[in-house]
Amino acid sequence: MVDLTALARQFIEALPHSVLLGMEPQEMGAGVATIRMPYKTELIGDPVTGVIHGGAVSALMDTCCGAAVMSHPDNKGGTATIDLRIDYMRAATPGQTITARATCYHMTRSVAFVRAVALDDDTENPVATATGAFTVEDKR
C-alpha cells in the first residue's frame, strides 16, 4: 500500500518552485495539509512596504490544496488543479511566516473539492482564503 502522506510530502519537497519559495510541509494526512512559507526578501512584491507578492501566496495555497487532495485516503495518487479561487483579505505582515492549511472536504470519482486559509502571525485575520477543485485519479 502506498503511503499517500509520505508521497505528498516528497512531492512538495521535490517541486522546484516549492523549494525556491521555501515551503516547509508541516502536517499532512487524511485530506488535511499545512505548509509554511517563511518570509524571504526575494518574494517581496512591493519594495516600499516589504509585502510578499500575491503570486507567492497563491503558489503556497495551490500547493497546500494539492497536498490535501494527495493525502486524502480515497485518492489513488496524483492530482492537478482544475480551478482555484483565491480571495486576498489583506497584505501579509512583512517579516512574518505565512502558513496555509487546506482541507479536502469532498471527493467524487474524478474531482476533489478543497478549502484553504493562509495566515501569518495574526491568526484572527486571514491573509487569504481559497476554494478549489482538483483532479482525482479514477478509482475504477
Image: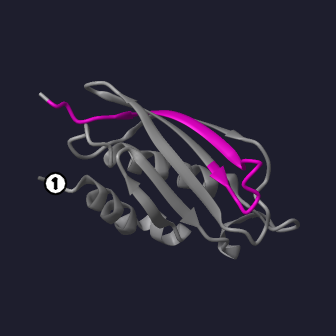
Residue highlighted by disc 1:
2
Q: Residue drawn 79% across and 48% down?
A: 90
On the image, the x and y values in percent for residue 83 come to 48, 32
Compared with 31, 2 (above or below) is below
Amino acid on which disc 1 is placed: Val
Q: Please state the total of marks drawn on the protein image.
A: 1
- Can residue 84 be seen here? The reply is no
On the image, the x and y values in percent for residue 79 come to 32, 42
Compared with 116, 11 (above or below) is below
Dot 1: element: loop
Q: Furthest residue to the top?
A: 108
On the image, the x and y values in percent for residue 101 come to 54, 50
Q: Nearer the viewer, residue 49 or 117?
A: 117
Q: Residue drawn 16% across and 31% down?
A: 139
**Residue 96 sits in quarter:** bottom right
Q: Within 10 Å of the Cα at label 1, are there few (<14), some (14-19), or many (20+) other Cα atoms? A: few
Q: Is residue 126 magenta?
A: yes
**Residue 80 sits in quarter:** top left
Q: Residue drawn 50% across and 46% down?
A: 102
Q: Furthest residue to the right?
A: 48
Compared with 7, 117 (above or below) is above
Q: Nearer the viewer, residue 43 or 139?
A: 139
On the image, the x and y values in percent for residue 103 come to 47, 41
Q: Residue drawn 16% across and 54% down?
A: 2
Color scheme of the displayed model: one colour
- Can residue 106 be seen here? The reply is yes
Image quadrant in which the C terminus is located:
top left
The magenta stretch spans which residues? 118-139
